[in-house]
């Protein structure tokens, strides 16, 4: 028996020596139960990751949808064109200097549609040079001969100052009867009709006569409903030793409104703001600020009034360089008409009494 056992041992040793291997137990063995536990844990981890990813994607979708809805609503509403500016509308970041200055207005805000500022054919302001400008005509002793036949203003106007940036300060009329603009043609038909809603003050003047600008320009905005239909404008030249009390009050209140959070109100006499006996020019134009909407009838007083040099200096310092005026625009074949009752012997209207600015 012993010799048989020894023989078996020798055969196993020989097999191992010839390269055979005996089965060895694994160093670490996982039971089926443990495998199930680990698999379940892995599933939980994957579920948590999926939930986090799902929540993240959900928030992303919600934000994207919200932005899309806001965009659709904004575009659907469209720009408030030619509306009362004092209500805080049309306040995109346009200015009078740098890459947001007038030459760039047309491309600043696609959603607000300022394209008329670049592409419009009836843009304001313009230069009027009687006897020189193409398309200029004079109608003496016609249906309209003086400002008083077109513009009616009360003795005083109560206003609230609204400064909206962009170097523009508005004076919104707050009383029941602010004034009217009624411009008849021959045969009694009506060119335009509106109520005074606000006043805008510019320095230097936007409009020019014989290519000459004056120190200041006051524009009276007349509206029908919420649409601005006409602008009556007055130019002022500065005389160092002479002031304009009414215009000076607007200057002071405009500056004061920028220095306080309180509402600034005032009442101004209209007697020195315009000349009801003056002749006037008429042409078809636009707003001089974005969105530069056309279809606005302009009435420019022919006679130039006076303002104090100190008043001009205060306002110009307030609005800053280069002022708050849009450059004059091309006429593009437009007619400019002077309604007057006084012509010289040759039938030509005398030039306005322009003097060098001080």
Image (spheres, rainbow, N blue to C red):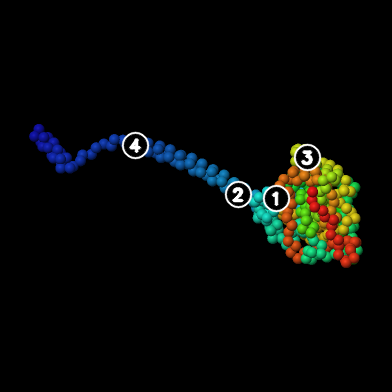
Task: Choose between 113 and 344: the one closer to the eye.
Answer: 344
Structural distance between the alpha carbons of marks 1 and 3: 22 Å
Q: CB atoms at circles 2 and 1 under 8 Å apart?
A: no
Q: Position of residue 179 (x, y in %)?
A: 87, 51
Task: Choose between 28 and 282: the one closer to the eye.
Answer: 282
Residue reaching furthest to the top: 2
Name the residue at 20% across, 41% down.
21
Q: On the picture, is 40 further left or further right than 267?
A: left
Task: Choose between 209 and 299: the one closer to the eye.
Answer: 209
State which tag comes first along the sequence, 1 or 4. Answer: 4
State which tag comes first along the sequence, 1 or 3. Answer: 1
Q: Secondary structure at mark 3?
A: helix
Q: Check residue 256 in the rendering and tell me which mark sits there, or answer none.
A: 3
- Circle nearer the viewer, 4 or 2: 2
Q: Check residue 30 in the rendering and tell me which mark sits there, or answer none.
A: 4
- Circle nearer the viewer, 2 or 3: 3
Q: Check residue 65 in the rendering and tell me which mark sits there, or answer none.
A: 2
Q: Secondary structure at mark 2?
A: helix
Name the residue at 71% across, 47% down.
321
Q: Which residue is mark 1?
A: 96
State which tag comes first along the sequence, 2 or 3. Answer: 2
State which tag comes first along the sequence, 2 or 1. Answer: 2
Name the residue at 79% across, 66% down.
135
Count of numbered circles on the image: 4
């Amino acid at each position: 028996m012993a010799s048989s056992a020894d023989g078996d041992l020798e055969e196993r040793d020989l097999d191992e020596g010839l390269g055979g291997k005996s089965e060895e137990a694994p160093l670490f063995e996982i039971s089926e139960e443990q495998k199930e536990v680990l698999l379940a844990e892995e599933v939980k981890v994957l579920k948590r990751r999926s939930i986090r990813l799902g929540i993240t994607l959900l928030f992303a979708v919600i934000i994207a949808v919200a932005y899309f809805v806001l965009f659709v609503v904004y575009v659907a509403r469209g720009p408030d064109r030619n509306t009362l500016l004092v209500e805080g509308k049309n306040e995109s970041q346009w200015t009078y200097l740098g890459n947001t200055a007038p030459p760039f207005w047309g491309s600043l805000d696609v959603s607000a549609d300022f394209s008329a500022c670049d592409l419009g054919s009836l843009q304001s302001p313009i230069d009027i040079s009687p006897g020189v400008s193409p398309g200029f005509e004079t109608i003496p002793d016609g249906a309209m001969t003086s400002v008083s036949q077109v513009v009616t203003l009360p003795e005083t106007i109560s206003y609230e100052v609204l400064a909206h940036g962009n170097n523009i300060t508005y004076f919104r009329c707050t009383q029941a009867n602010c004034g009217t603009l009624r411009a008849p043609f021959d045969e009694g038909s009506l060119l335009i009709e509106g109520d005074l809603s606000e006043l805008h003050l510019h320095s230097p003047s936007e409009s020019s006569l014989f290519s000459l600008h004056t120190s200041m320009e006051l524009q009276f905005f007349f509206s029908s409903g919420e649409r601005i239909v006409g602008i009556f404008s007055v130019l002022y030249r500065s005389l160092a030793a002479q002031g304009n009390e009414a215009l000076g009050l607007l200057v002071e209140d405009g500056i004061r409104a920028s220095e306080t959070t309180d509402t600034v109100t005032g009442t101004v006499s209209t007697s020195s703001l315009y000349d009801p006996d003056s002749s006037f020019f008429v042409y078809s134009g636009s707003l001089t600020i974005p969105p530069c909407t056309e279809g606005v009838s302009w009435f420019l007083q022919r006679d130039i009034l006076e303002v104090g040099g100190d008043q001009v200096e205060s306002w110009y310092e307030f609005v800053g360089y280069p002022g708050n005026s849009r450059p004059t625009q091309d006429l593009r074949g437009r007619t400019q008409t002077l309604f007057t009752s006084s012509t010289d012997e040759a039938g030509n209207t005398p030039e306005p009494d322009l003097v060098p600015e001080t």
